[in-house]
Image (spheres, rainbow, N blue to C red):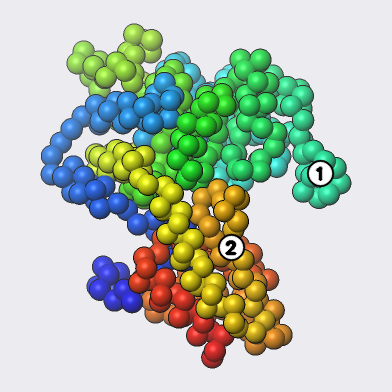
Amino acid sequence: MPDDTIYEDLGVPSVVNATGTKTRIGGSRIRPEAVDAMNRAADAFVRLSDLQARASDLIADVTGAQAGYVTSGAAAALALGAAACIAGDDIGAMAQLPDTEGLPGEIVMARTHRTGYDHALRAAGARIVDVGTNDHHLGTGAQNVEPWEYADAITEDTAAVAYVQKPYTEPSLEAVCDVAHDHNVPVVVDAAAELPPVTNLEAFIDAGADLVAFSGGKAIRGPQTTGFLAGRAALVSSVAAQHLDMHAAEAVWEPPTTLVDPEALGGVPRQGIGRPMKVGKEELAGFIRALDAFKAEDHDARQREWRARSERIAATLDSVAGVRTSITAADKTAVAPELTVTVEAGSAGISATEVVGALRREEPRVFVGADDLPEAFTVNPMCLTDEETTYVDERIRAQFDA
Ligand SMILES: *Cc1c(COP(=O)(O)O)cnc(C)c1O
């Protein structure tokens, strides 16, 4: 299995990825057309704002939003989205962030939508105001949060409502957008990993979201350090003004008007809060090609290929004592059909935790999903080739035979 990777050359063990698009092991396998675009981008210069304007047109086209912007990942998109909601087109406010004194610095979120990634919102200076309870999860009630609870938390200090999109998040995005818009507050959606289905490119904009953050390095298979925002033109302009390199002489500052309106800003902004999250010409060119290719892909064929890989491994493990397998039902598939392997350590002779640990210590390292430990591990087919599926199948089986 992979023994001629760049990582072996560097003396670092490579990984066979059976856990999906996880950043800590490199995300996804970038598309060849995106690599080609990056190589060509590396060899010539371009004004980044022109390339961002080109990307904005493509993002608008595939999402139905007014505009878009490429960031250094979905997390950076959240930070920049928060900065845009707080500062708007006020260049003084842009210069002040992350200090939000005197600015609307609060972002309202359902307590059950809080994740580690919302640190990105706080990085822009926002303070998160939690609403609702955890009733549904705990079984102490039917609802986690009611629309009126959002309304109650929105004040003149509110910059935005943030929403984490998952197939099961409550209340519906439509309901939350209705409440927020009644109070003239924008809604920022974290949909980083909600592709495929490809229809989700448009779904959250259709539902009323003002900014949606997606990852470019997950299923889109663009450069790993890309993500993007799709949304309202005014907010995207604010993002651009806070992200583009701004050592600009005003007399010759002519950014593309589809992206930044110098008249509305009334001057050249300072280097903004987004400047440490820069995106290079290589990432931009690679991302544009990858998003084009993702949109054009045969998504049904992809799902069938993924399911076949999960089924192959399930068939091998089903005969092992103490092991039970299940594959995400076709109608429940939000992203890829994943195999869950439940291990009863007593009869299997090894626990799920031991299997996962042993696989990670191999060379190459084999990464299966560890989120369901200690009872089960998962195998995600998204980042496996057929050859690697055979290898993973053998290596998992070997742990039980040892
Ligand atoms: C992956 C993920 C992110 C971060 O995306 P990057 O593109 O790696 O920055 C943010 N939010 C959620 C819910 C994610 O799954």
Q: Is residue 182 above or below residue 123?
A: above
Observer-side mark, 1 or 2, equals 2
Labels 1 and 2: the sequence-earlier one: 1
Residue in view at x 76 percent, y 34 percent: 145
Residue nearest the observer in this picture, 358 or 175: 175
Please provide percent x and percent y for residue 237: 39, 21
Residue in view at x 69 percent, y 86 percent: 347
Disc 1 residue type?
Asp
Residue extending furthest toward the bottom: 402
The label shown at residue 327 is: 2
Circles 1 and 2: CB distance less than 8 Å? no
Please provide percent x and percent y for residue 341: 60, 71
Residue nearest the observer in this picture, 297 or 126: 297
According to the picture, the residue beneath numbered tag 1 turns out to be 135
Residue in view at x 41 percent, y 53 percent: 302
Please provide percent x and percent y for residue 47: 21, 29
Please provide percent x and percent y for residue 168: 66, 43
On the question of residue 249 being in view, the answer is yes
Q: CA distance from mark 1 to mark 2?
A: 29 Å
Quadrant hosting residue 297: top left
Quadrant hosting residue 125: top right
Could you tell whether 36 is left or right of 308 in the image? Answer: left
Disc 2 residue type?
Ile
On the question of residue 24 being in view, the answer is no
